[in-house]
Image (cartoon, rainbow, N blue to C red):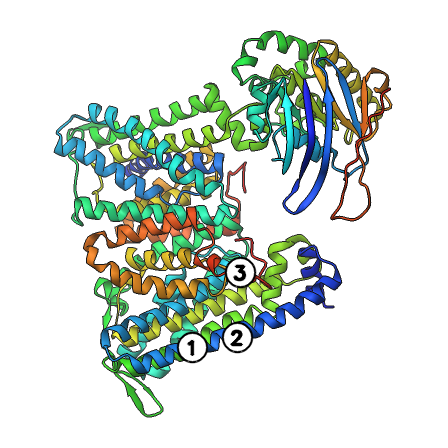
Amino acid sequence: MLSIESLNSGYGDFKVIQNVSLRMERGQAAGILGPNGHGKSTFLKTVCGLLRPDSGKVEFKGEDVTGLGAAAMASRGLVYVAEDRRLFNDMTVHENLMLGAYLPRAQKVRSRNLEFVHALFPRLAERRSQRAGSLSGGEAQMLAMARGLMSAPDCIALDEPSLGLSPKLTATLMDAVVEINRTGITVLLVEQSLDLIRPHLSKVWRIEEGALKRENPAAILQDMEV
Amino acid sequence: MSVLDSIRSSASGKTVNDVDHGSVQQAGFLRRSQIAFATSVACLAGLGLAIESNYLLHILILALIWCVVVASWDLLMGYAGLMNFGQLVFFAVGGYASQMLALQAGLGALPSLFVAVAASASFGLLVGLPCLRLRGEYVALFTFAVHLAFPTLLQLGRNHGTGGSAGLMGGQPLELFGYSLTSADKTAWFFLMLAIASFCVWLIYFVLLRGRMGLAFIALRDAEQAARVLGVNEVRYRLLSFVISAGLTGLAGALYANYLGVIAPTVLGNEFFLIAMTMLCVGGMGRFPGVILGAFVITIGNELLREFGEYRLLILGVIVVASTIWLPHGIAAWLKIPRLPFRTRL
Amino acid sequence: MSEAIFILVSGIITGTVYAVFAAGLSLVYGTSRILNFAYGSFYMMAAYLAWFLVVRLELNYAVAAMVLLPALFLIGLVVDHLVIRRLRQSENWKLVSMMGTLGLALILDNAALVAFGPEQRSIPPISSNVVQMGPMFIGVQEIAIFFIAIVAIVALELFLRTAPLGQAMRAVSQDMQGASMVGIGVDRVFAVAFGLSLVLVGIAALTLSPVTLVSPQAGWPLFLKAFVIVVFGGLGSINGALIAALILGVTETAVIYYLGTSWTMLVWLLVLVIVLMVRPKGLLGVWGV
């Protein structure tokens, strides 16, 4: 489904991700674990086309998608849900969801997906005509995930959905992640802690800076089959 | 290490040792560029003695006037991060002030020159003040609006001595040390302009930008938040750069008016603006000596293009667009000059 | 009293056309953050094309519009592809795009000078009839301008609210990265916005050039006005631009009526200074910078 080979990425001269490889099978749910500032987010952004890799290879559904932009990734079914949500704040919740289904492939299954996300997050159905910018943190995160689901992904990449949320809300979101995976969508989840969801994950990696030297923030991925 | 030094090192992501090493390199680079600068001035002086053609001297005088304008412009756009598009207004203010004082107030040419510089510097202060509150595009909008509205001001001032669309013609030649510089005396004008342009370029690039002001601009550009927190006085330096830039450009305008014996609203017209833009784009902003080279290349190139007649300005426009696309750093990028201490992101 | 009504009516008519024109500048800035300095020169070019179609080819207005507007849309796509897109990809795109579009403006000005010469051209009005409305007489031309402009604004607003591409434009203007994450081709949206802005320029050119004259420098005053309107209304906000344009249209008419035409540019500049000092981000701006 998703195969990454010796990926290198960073910001200009500042290398963050070094030589990272991983593989995921269709329908799997996997997690990447690591403390703040060790490149979890950079890695996910590179895979999903928001950052250009310096070198390495990303393969999705057997196709080489290295270096494609985020829109091209989304149209192939690899959808990124950002930690900072990236909602359209001046639009309503409903408009945000409809824009999630912007791509033709998503438009075909729009009403079915809308039902699914409303069932998954009933709160969004209640807030349907509210401005996205006025949502609470938890609701905004639900909307970000729901908008990602509206794009009809084959694989959804979730970047720290629990960031800044209460334990209770985090539990709700993790239940939703399990639910999403149950519908057959491949899930790649990046978090600081995977305690709540670990039993449901088929693979967990740890991303860590090798040393504290800025020039060499080696990202070591350990395959810790659980 | 001063506050600014520490900002510089943090901004460039280097350790303290690196900076020390860097400043050794810098010192060498500074000496080399000073030598190169002095040599260039000396060569130009030699050229001025060798050239007998009045036409060629005239072109070089214009190029030197342009040097002052684009160097002052570069101080704002290339270094201070102020997207000012109203530079030629300062030029016009200087030119008009000196002509109006000389023709209407009967002031001598030299005192007029000084008052003109003061007038344009004050005008720079006036334009600069609102810009301090504005960011990026809004500075560009505001200053360009001033540029667009200024000709109508000159029209409205017809009854107050601006001469309307015909401009102001005449005036006494400049007298320096008992020597009278008439427009016909090209060699004398060439050396006067060479002295003034060298002084302005030296002042901007070797004094101001290598001093605290330059460091403050680097700090503000590379690590704006950090610089603010550490107390770099952004307002003071930006305003100061506006005033100096406007004053020097006004000096160029006053000299231009005195040299040609005329100033007219055309200095704010399509052609002047286009020529100045071409110098900035082709030369490369924020990369000394980019715009200086641009001034010479384009002044001479503009003369060569005259054989294309009415297509000349069209060609210059194409050069501007082409260079912004394919040569965003200007010809300065070809020189491979080490960019310390101006770690330019341009 | 009738004087005040005259200024109000005439100012509102001018204001709606200004709103159409300024909306295009706002649209391009709102989506791509590119400040198009060539916008006034595109107006000038569109006015010459309109003159060419109406006067030289003697087409009627409706046919001229049907030729002109799609042509301008295509020109917009081409210019975006050849110039604007490359400027946007530059490292220092903000400054480079300003210099580049200014260069583009000067190319268009000088091309017009070469092609049409410096003399001013005029386009005959759509109709020179006058109708009586209460105490005042109003030209059919003015009424036509007003309705065309209103239709254009309503159509634009509808497009942005309901059409998928219009929604995508709003999405891009609110969060470019978010838009690309849902699969919106951001470059395509930029290109369409640029093309659309030239269509709005074309509508302004068709309605304004019978009233004003066409010359190679004609774009600049209008460009300054559009700037002031957009800043007044907040860069990137179409509704803000409409309100600002109406206020400033009436102001301008009053200035012309009481002080004379030569004062208009200075008053616009003054308004700009005041607006920038009071609210550096525009009075009604939502997207800001």
Looking at the image, is mark 1 or mark 3 earlier in the sequence?
1
Residue B281 position (above or below residue A54): below
Left or right of C192: which side holds A97? right
Amino acid found under the numbered disc labelled 1: Val
Q: Are marks 2 and 1 on the same chain?
A: yes
Camera-side residue: B75 or C281?
A: B75
Tag nearer the camera, 1 or 3: 1
Amino acid found under the numbered disc labelled 2: Gln
Secondary structure of the residue carrying numbered label 3: helix
Tag nearer the camera, 3 or 2: 2
Crowdedness near tag 3: few (<14), some (14–19) or many (≥20) residues, C-alpha within 10 Å: many
Name the quadrant of the N terminus of chain B.
bottom right
User: Mark number for residue B41?
Assistant: 1
Residue to which mark 3 is pinned: B79
Residue A105 position (above or below residue A191): above
Query: Disc 3 versus disc 2: distance between alpha carbons?
Result: 19 Å
Query: Disc 1 versus disc 3: distance between alpha carbons?
Result: 23 Å
